[in-house]
Image (cartoon, grey):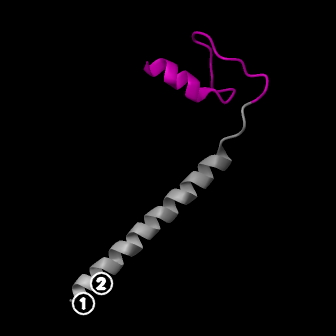
């Protein structure tokens, strides 16, 4: 019986730590991504997208 209770407590602790880790990751990724520059235009063809914050757009176009 004690082992079952200990297992349940351990599972709750692990799930709590996972949730905390996900929140920290979300907050960190939110602050790491700079806002897109105003002078960035949508890239055409083989232009380099890494200079402005449109890298996600380029990755989506290349995966299609």
Label 1, residues with CA under 10 Å away: few <14, some 14-19, many ≥20: few
Q: Quadrant of residue 3?
A: bottom left
Q: Residue furthest top?
A: 45
Looking at the magenta stretch, what is its main secondary structure? Answer: loop
37 or 50, which is in the foreground?
Answer: 37
Q: Is residue 21 left or right of residue 47?
A: left
Q: Residue at x 67, y 49 (%)?
A: 31
Tell me the SS state at disc 2: helix
Chain part drawn in magenta: 37-64
In the rendered image, the quadrant that contains the N terminus is bottom left
- Across and down, in percent, residue 46 comes to 57, 12
Residue 23's tag is none
Please tell me whether residue 46 belongs to the stretch shown in magenta: yes
Q: Residue at x 29, y 84 (%)?
A: 6
- Across and down, in percent, residue 52 comes to 69, 27
Q: Is residue 56 left or right of residue 33?
A: left
Q: Quadrant of residue 36?
A: top right
Residue highlighted by disc 2: 6
Q: Is residue 32 above or below residue 48?
A: below
In the rendered image, the quadrant that contains the C terminus is top left
Q: Is residue 21 left or right of residue 38?
A: left
Q: Is residue 25 above or below residue 50?
A: below
Q: Residue at x 65, y 46 (%)?
A: 32
11 or 49, which is in the foreground?
Answer: 11
Q: Residue furthest bottom?
A: 2
Residue highlighted by disc 1: 2
């Amino acid at each position: 019986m004690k082992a079952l209770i200990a297992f349940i407590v351990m599972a709750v602790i692990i799930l709590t730590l996972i949730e905390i880790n996900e929140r920290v990751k979300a907050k960190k990724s939110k602050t790491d991504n700079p806002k897109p520059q105003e002078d960035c235009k949508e890239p055409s063809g083989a232009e380099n997208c890494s200079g402005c914050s449109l890298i996600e757009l380029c990755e989506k176009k290349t995966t299609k």
